Amino acid sequence: MTGERIPRALTVAGSDSGGGAGIQADLKTFLALGVYGMSAITALTAQNTRQVTAVHEVPPAFVAAQIDAVVEDLGADAVKTGMLANAGIIEAVADRVRRHRVRRLVVDPVMVAKSGDPLLRPDARDALVRELLPLALVVTPNLPEAEVLVKRPVRDRREMEEAARALHDLGAAVVVVKGGHQDTDEAADVCYDGRTVQVFRAPRLPTRNTHGTGCTFSAAIAAWLALGLDPAGAVARAKAFITDAIRQSLAIGGGRGPTNPGGLVRPVRDAWVP
């Protein structure tokens, strides 16, 4: 409806030229959930379903300028971060989060692509912990990312809970340690908010097409936060959303195909055919 205020979400992340992850996955997710999506690009990747062949990192000052341009004019009800590439970009993003008083920040600590290619410089880990985690309303590491952040193995349910508590102690308000890398019949994520541990479960689906899973999940959390849900409600709905996106994943390309965040959106192309 004309004039009706639409919730807005900003993704600060890298561009995936293959369209399966990064800002492309985030914007598809925002659209599917009825949220107006905006982006600040941190890096350009030459990427497909098989590998990342090149990365061009955006200067930190230009990342900051993109955030300023969006927030000062359009505003943002929620912000999520994905690939941040290096310490300079992390510091610039954290500065803008503080300056613009962003309260609903989702941090997806992207470190490695699904293909195994690195997306975060090794020396940037400390900057991520120092600068961004204390600003995060929700942080969403997978098991390998959690291990890097807490500097110890994270493999089973007990270690996932311990990692969630440790990351909360580092400043994140709500921590979701994702169990997608476990070899189990279900994909179970552990969520800790400083008081209560919740486990969000879904069946493990028999597909290799999971490119963009973490991006889509964290973007869905940001979208639901922008729509007014509390963190636990946003995580629960995002878990259901990513499960459907994996269920409807696309077998395209020669590697790991992408999840399909637009799978529940009814195609309207036929309506435009004369």
Image (spheres, rainbow, N blue to C red):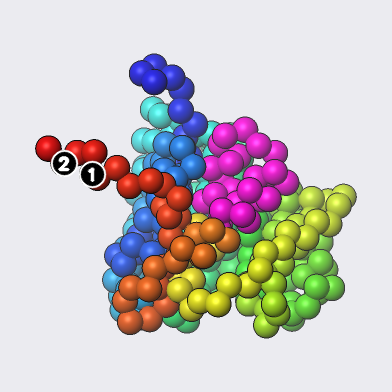
Observer-nearest of 163 and 184: 184
Q: Amino acid at mark 1?
A: Asp
Q: Amino acid at mark 2?
A: Val
Predominant secondary structure, magenta span = helix
Q: Position of residue 55 (x, y in %)?
A: 33, 71
Observer-nearest of 172 and 96: 172
Q: Position of residue 46 (x, y in %)?
A: 29, 71
Tell me: 224 left or right of 50. Answer: right
Query: In this picture, which residue range is highlighted in magenta?
Result: 217-242
Q: Secondary structure at mark 1?
A: helix
- Do tag 1 and tag 2 residues touch (Cβ < 8 Å)? yes
Q: Which mark is residue 270?
A: 1
Say if 100 sits above or below 201 in the image.
above
Residue beneath the point at 65% across and 45% down = 234
Q: Secondary structure at mark 2?
A: loop
Camera sees residue 189: no
Give the tally of numbered discs: 2
Observer-nearest of 251 and 234: 251
Name the image quarter holding residue 71.
Answer: top left
Q: Which residue is mark 2?
A: 273
Observer-nearest of 209 and 9: 209
Residue 233 among magenta residues: yes
Q: Position of residue 108 (x, y in %)?
A: 57, 59
